Image: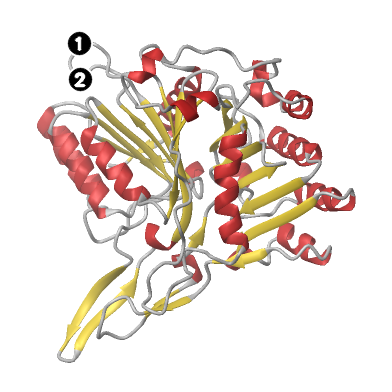
Amino acid sequence: MSRRLTHRALTALTALTALGGLACETTPETDPAPFDDLLEVNDETRAAATLFRTILIEPAGSSAGPAWSYAAAVDEVRTLVASAEVSLEVMLEDFEDAQIAQAIIDAVDRGVDVRVVGDIDRRAQTGFEMLEEADLAPVYGDGELLWNGVFGEDPILRTGEDNRMTHNVIIADRQRLISLSAGFPENVREIGQAGFAADSEVLARDFGNIFDQLHGEVFATTLTYFDQSVVSDSNNRTLYETDESIIELYFGPQEPLVKELIDRIYAARSAVWIATSSMLNSEIARALRYKGAAGFDVRLVVSGQQTAQDEAGALPAVFADLAEQRGDDLPAFRVLPALAGSGTLIILDGQPFFAGDDKQPGVALVLSAALLESVPYAITGVRPDGLDLEARPSDRFTDAHLWAVHGGPDDTEDYRVLREQFLRLFDAAVEVE
């Protein structure tokens, strides 16, 4: 595959001002050697280098860091939509923005093949209603489900809020794309988001393959006769060389995203920092408790107080006890309402474990969903004739994606932006007593 961009891709990429200095005639001949020691990069991935930049959207009234305002983000998305000449594919969980909806309708009017996927429980939102009124007919999924989760027991009713479609991605011409961690919910001006903008045939194709399944009405809630998932893993590539470093990309429920995060947390060598809209996962809670007890720099920021009556709900008290035992301020649990509905940002390592040691290379991960339970139900009671079962939000019934950027030996720009974003969120959060 040639590294030279087409004229059309160059024209559209120039319009995406958030990508900064990426609008160049050819992809830079980046030396991938520093990353070869961290990840196995195959020849096909290296030959298909990606133009990629991390982006941030800050809440109204905030001016921290190299972030877009919400108005600037809308302008960038509208510019991307306007650049589409052949096809436009839209996946949104929340869609309350009329300007972007109108831009999508305008693309239809100029002859672009437009297809849209959404979460059925958000169908009444402004953007989706505008598209339906324009006869665009979005495909919806992940609604209420009666699930035979445990053999021999009564079916479990899973509400629409237990099953989510959390992709917030817009793809133009299967080449250029923007991904956001929260999309355009009603409170969009009050929350922060992380995402990326890219000009990449391989990234657009892999997101497009997921889109094709969803548009074909195959969602996380699409099950076989035996109540097993129908979704297939068409993403044979997980590593992508960019103009600066290496990124990774995983899709769920095809791939176990929460399990990927649990494994990485246990494997961390110096620090585990997490900012998430909701922390519900007991296994991740156990991993954080283990790391905190072992002396790691563990920090957790959530959008509200923990209410679960399990390991996740006990984390504030557990962290306080561990901090007292350690005689310092870590591990730390803090609350920041601006994280509501914003997905999950995780920073692993990026600093030495002991003072004076070499820095452990860092990695930043962004999940399009909250940290949901691994097991999609809970046993709430035992009867003589069976069990009382209750549904739990779970990654098994969530259409989501996880992407990661590596800092390497000298902290790449994309990694550094996300690391500094976490520190801003942590400083703005309130410590739980």
Q: Residue furthest right?
A: 110
| Quarter occupied by the N terminus | top right
SS category of the residue bearing label 2: loop
What residue is disc 2 on? Answer: 353
Kindly check if marks 1 and 2 are in contact, taking CB atoms under 8 A apart as contact: yes
| Quarter occupied by the C terminus | top left
Give me the residue at 23% from left, 25% from top: 270
What residue is disc 1 on? Answer: 357
What color scheme is it? secondary structure
Residue 297 to residue 321: above or below = above
Residue type at the position of mark 2: Phe
SS category of the residue bearing label 1: loop
Name the side, left or right, on which 403 lies relative to 136. left
Between the residue at mark 1 and the residue at mark 2, the CA separation in whole angstroms equals 7 Å
Q: Residue furthest bottom?
A: 385
Along the viewing direction, whichever of 386 and 174 lies nearer the viewer: 174
Give me the residue at 35% from left, 66% from top: 392
- The quadrant holding residue 72 is top right
Residue 117 to residue 60: above or below = below
- The quadrant holding residue 426 is top left
Residue type at the position of mark 1: Asp
Determine crowd level at label 2: few under 14, some 14-19, many 20+ residues with C-alpha closer than 10 A.
some
Give residue 272's mark: none
